[in-house]
Image: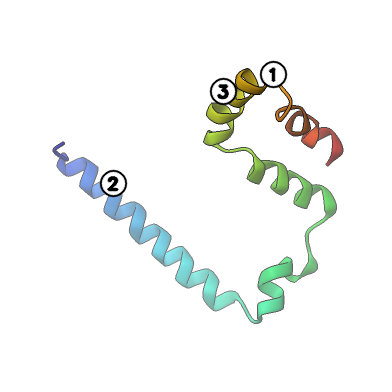
């Protein structure tokens, strides 16, 4: 597989952006507690949406349907209720 110069430029730009964001936000962080609890400024619904977004990934859309077909929906039902519970 050969990369075009545009592919390499895009990857390098993306990596530089990620590194610069990491440096910027690491300097804004003042303590370990503020890092882990977000300075306690986020409301419950924001944290709930973050939890739902974290539990949904590309693997979710591939593995859950296959596992549901294999086990007749037994392991998929709790995941269907996750947005309702949160």
- Nearer the viewer's eye, disc 1 or disc 2? 1
Q: CA distance from mark 3 to mark 1?
A: 10 Å
Q: Quadrant of the C terminus?
A: top right
Q: Circle 2 is placed at which residue position?
A: 10
Name the residue nearer the viewer: 31 or 80. 80
Disc number for residue 48 = none
Q: Circle 1 is placed at which residue position?
A: 72
Residue 74, given in percent of the width and then of the height, sits at 74, 26
- Whether residue 54 is situated above or below residue 73 in the rendered picture: below
Residue 55, given in percent of the width and then of the height, sits at 66, 42
Q: Residue furthest bottom?
A: 31
- Nearer the viewer's eye, disc 3 or disc 2? 3
Instruction: Decide which of tag 1 and tag 2 comes sooner along the chain.
Output: 2
Crowd class of label 1 (few under 14; some 14 to 19; many from 20; radius 10 Å): few
Residue 24, given in percent of the width and then of the height, sits at 49, 71
- Nearer the viewer's eye, disc 3 or disc 1? 1
Q: Write down the quadrant of residue 69 in the picture.
A: top right
Q: CA distance from mark 3 to mark 2?
A: 34 Å
- Determine whether the residue tagged by mark 3 lies in a helix, strand or loop: helix
Q: Residue at x 39, y 58 (%)?
A: 17
Q: Residue at x 61, y 21 (%)?
A: 70
Crowd class of label 2 (few under 14; some 14 to 19; many from 20; radius 10 Å): few
Q: Circle 3 is placed at which residue position?
A: 66
Colour theme: rainbow
Instruction: Decide which of tag 3 and tag 2 comes sooner along the chain.
Output: 2
- Whether residue 24 is situated above or below residue 64 in the rendered picture: below
Q: Residue at x 21, y 47 (%)?
A: 8
- Determine whether the residue tagged by mark 1 lies in a helix, strand or loop: loop
Crowd class of label 3 (few under 14; some 14 to 19; many from 20; radius 10 Å): some
């Amino acid at each position: 597989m050969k990369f075009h110069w545009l592919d390499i430029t895009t990857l390098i730009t993306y990596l530089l952006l990620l590194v610069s964001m990491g440096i910027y936000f690491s300097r804004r962080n003042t303590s370990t507690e503020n890092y882990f609890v977000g300075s306690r400024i986020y409301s419950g619904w924001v944290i709930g949406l973050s939890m739902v977004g974290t539990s949904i990934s590309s693997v979710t859309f591939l593995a859950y349907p296959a596992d549901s077909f294999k086990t007749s929906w037994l392991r998929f039902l709790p995941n269907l209720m996750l947005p309702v519970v949160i």
